């Protein structure tokens, strides 16, 4: 059974800075969402502040969005049956990788 996972990460980069980090660093988040399994991702900015993505692999499909706000980023992913049992582990990895991506440098 599919399970939605939502992670919210605070930042102090402003919308433009966070959006740029997401554009440049989405590859880093991909591995966190699939727990290291081989999935093929496709992504598209459906609005200025929303990145929609789909990942397919092992007969499973992950769908989700990344929404950029002035002071936080919200990552929402629906994990299929195979990954749903690992939802807590995966959400922790997404949060950790997202914090690294959005930390002030």
Image (cartoon, helix red, strand yellow):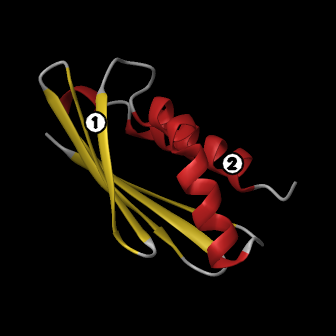
Q: Is residue 72 above or below residue 100?
A: below
Q: Is residue 10 above or below residue 57?
A: below
**The C terminus: image quadrant:** bottom right
The x, y position of residue 14, in whole percent, is 70, 77
The x, y position of residue 31, in whole percent, is 48, 29
* Distance from Cα at disc 2 to Cα at disc 1: 24 Å
Residue 33 in which image quadrant: top left
Left or right, residue 29 beside residue 5: right
**The N terminus: image quadrant:** top left
Residue closest to the eye, 61 or 81: 61
Q: Residues within 10 Å of mark 2 (few under 14, many from 20)?
A: some
Residue 84 badge: 1
Q: Residue at x 50, y 33 (%)?
A: 32
Q: Residues within 10 Å of mark 1 (few under 14, many from 20)?
A: some
Asked whether residue 101 appears in the rendered view, the answer is: yes
The residue at which mark 2 appears reads as 101
Q: Residue at x 18, y 36 (%)?
A: 61
Residue closest to the eye, 88 or 62: 62
Front position among marks 2 and 1 = 2
Left or right, residue 41 beside residue 66: left
Q: Residue at x 56, y 67 (%)?
A: 73
Q: Residue at x 32, y 49 (%)?
A: 43
Q: Is residue 9 above or below residue 34?
A: below
Left or right, residue 46 beside residue 90: left
Q: Secondary structure at mark 1?
A: helix
Seen as rendered, the residue at the extreme right is: 105
Asked whether residue 4 appears in the rendered view, the answer is: no
């Amino acid at each position: 059974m599919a399970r939605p996972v939502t992670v919210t990460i605070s930042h102090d980069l402003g919308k433009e800075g966070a959006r740029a980090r997401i554009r440049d660093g989405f590859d880093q988040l991909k591995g966190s969402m699939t727990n290291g399994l081989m999935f093929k991702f496709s992504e598209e900015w459906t609005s200025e502040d929303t990145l929609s993505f789909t990942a397919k692999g092992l007969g499973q499909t992950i769908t989700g969005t990344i929404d950029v706000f002035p002071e936080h980023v919200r990552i929402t992913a629906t994990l299929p049956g195979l990954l749903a049992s690992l939802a807590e582990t995966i959400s922790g990895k997404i949060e950790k990788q997202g914090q690294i991506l959005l930390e002030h440098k």
